[in-house]
């Protein structure tokens, strides 16, 4: 199992860049450069499709769709992640632009504060369970000692300058927890903790989706 794919997606930052561009806060060139740095590519034709006709009440709506094992995403062909523009069109990780046969299910619409609180509580609960098992690792309580390089990776190539601080902080929290999970399971090669740590996946994804929705909403206010 690819642990990184479960806790991080380049579509997080890609979707924030797309939302910033749709609202005139970033140039197409900067958007394409950022996407290229993320290993994500889409043609100018796709950008044109995303801009034209994808407005509700005069405002483009962009959100991140992430799902995990056993979760229904509403996406076709078993896809588990996408950038949604409106409720009936998505941009997939391979750059394909698709019209959906039915609108996507409504998201949770968590606020950054709610998402952060859920992620913090889940992390604390996981740490308590791990401690109760008798396992000890600095990755749980001093993550900077072991996951700094991973956190740097997650943040590349960064976010648009207009990204609201609350969204950026939520992404940073999700990156930190994701780095802990990846460090303990993949880098340390210890999978005995998987039942405790894998429960964090859903909260990491929820935080990333909430951050994108919040950023896109704030861009619409500018």
Image: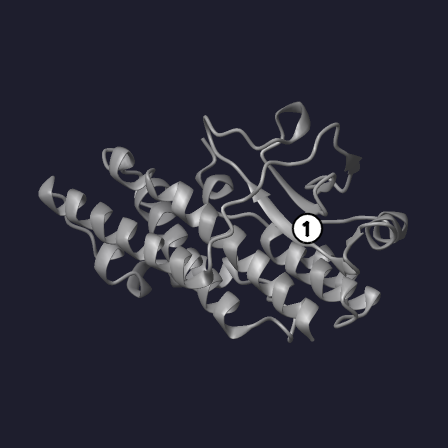
In the rendered image, which quarter is residue 38 located in? bottom right
Query: How packed is label 1: few (under 14 Cα within 10 Å), some, or many (20 or more)?
Result: few
Residue at the (77%, 57%) spot, across then down: 57
Where residue 118 sits in the image (x, y, percent)?
34, 53
Q: In the displayed structure, does residue 136 sit left or right of residue 216? A: left
**Which structural element holds mark 1?**
loop
**Closer to the camera, 126 or 206?**
206
Residue 21 or residue 89, whichever sits in front: 89
Q: To which quarter of the image does residue 87 belong?
A: top right
Residue 182 in the image, given as x and y percentages of width and height = 38, 46
- In the image, residue 171 sits, relative to residue 128, either above or below, namely below
In the image, residue 91 above or below residue 149 = above
User: Which residue bears the numbered disc 1?
Assistant: 39
Total numbered labels: 1
Look at the image and tell me whether residue 142 can be seen: yes
Q: Residue at x 24, y 54 (%)?
A: 140
Q: Nearer the viewer, residue 195 or 142?
A: 195
Q: Please tell me which residue is depicted at 51% across the width and 51% down the height of the picture.
A: 109
Q: Position of residue 173 (x, y in %)?
A: 40, 61
Which color scheme is applied?
Answer: one colour
Answer whether residue 157 is visible to the viewer in this image.
no
Locate the C terminus by quadrant.
Answer: bottom right
Location of residue 52 in the rendering, given as x and y in whole percent from the top left corner: 88, 52
Residue shown at the point (30%, 57%) measured from the top left: 120
- Is residue 190 positioned above or below 127 on the image? above
């Amino acid at each position: 199992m690819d642990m990184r794919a479960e806790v991080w997606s380049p579509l997080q930052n890609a979707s924030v860049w797309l939302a910033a561009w749709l609202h005139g806060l970033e140039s197409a060139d900067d958007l394409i450069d950022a996407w290229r740095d993320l290993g994500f590519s889409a043609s100018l034709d796709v950008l044109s499709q995303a801009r034209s006709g994808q407005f509700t009440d005069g405002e483009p709506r962009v959100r991140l769709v992430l799902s995990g094992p056993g979760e229904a995403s509403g996406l076709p062909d078993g896809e588990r992640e996408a950038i949604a523009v409106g409720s009936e069109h998505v941009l997939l990780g391979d750059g394909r632009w698709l019209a959906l046969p039915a609108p996507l299910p409504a998201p949770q619409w968590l606020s950054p504060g709610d998402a952060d609180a859920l992620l913090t509580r889940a992390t604390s609960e996981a740490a308590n369970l791990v401690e109760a098992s008798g396992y000890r690792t600095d990755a749980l309580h001093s993550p900077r000692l072991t996951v700094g390089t991973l956190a740097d990776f997650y943040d590349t190539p960064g976010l648009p300058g207009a990204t609201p601080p609350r969204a950026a902080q939520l992404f940073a929290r999700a990156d930190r927890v994701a780095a802990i999970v990846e460090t303990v399971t993949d880098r340390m090669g210890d999978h005995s903790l998987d039942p405790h740590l894998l429960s964090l996946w859903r909260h990491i994804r929820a935080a990333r989706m909430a951050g994108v929705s919040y950023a896109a909403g704030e861009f619409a206010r500018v």
